[in-house]
Amino acid sequence: MKPCAVTFTDLNGLRQTVELEADTVYEAAVLALQAFRKASFAELPPGLASRFQVVVREPIVTHEVSLLKVREWVERGSTNPAEVIRKQRLREILERSLPKSV
């Protein structure tokens, strides 16, 4: 797992960042969504149109991904057993963390 910082900007223009560890950019986005929802600092939590900036700390690399793309990734099949398990776990977190109307 790699240390990451994941940031999104809420509807008020406030940038919110969480530090976590993840194996993939998509995993970082799902875990960040879960953390943002738990913290509930944003008036309107991130939804599928939200864009997350993921900064991997070692080596420093920045990625940007929408939650829509994250959802598409977790729902895509895989032939790698470890990835199948990871996607199943992340899909469950994503389903619990996204607003119910999405």
Image (spheres, rainbow, N blue to C red):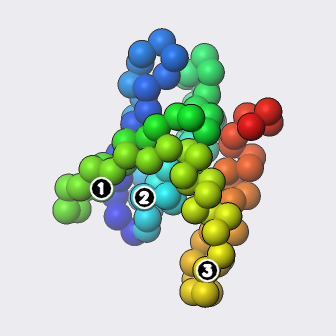
Q: Earlier in the sequence, mark 3 or mark 2?
A: 2
- For label 2, the residue is 25
Residue at point 51%, 17% (across, down): 11
Element type where label 1 sits in the image = strand
Type of amino acid at the residue the image marks with label 1:
Val
Q: Which residue is tagged 1?
A: 56
Q: What SS does tag 3 mark?
A: loop
Which residue, as the protein is rendered here, is positioned at the far left? 59
Give the mark nearer the N terminus: 3 vs 1.
1
Tell me the number on the disc at residue 46: none
Determine which quarter of the picture holds residue 92.
Answer: bottom right
The residue indicated by pointer 3 is: 78
Identify which amino acid the numbered label 3 is placed on: Ser
Q: Is residue 70 left or right of residue 54?
A: right
Q: Amino acid at mark 2?
A: Val
Give the image location of residue 19, x and y in percent. 39, 45
**Of labels 1 and 2, the one closer to you:** 2
Q: Nearer the viewer, mark 3 or mark 1?
A: 3
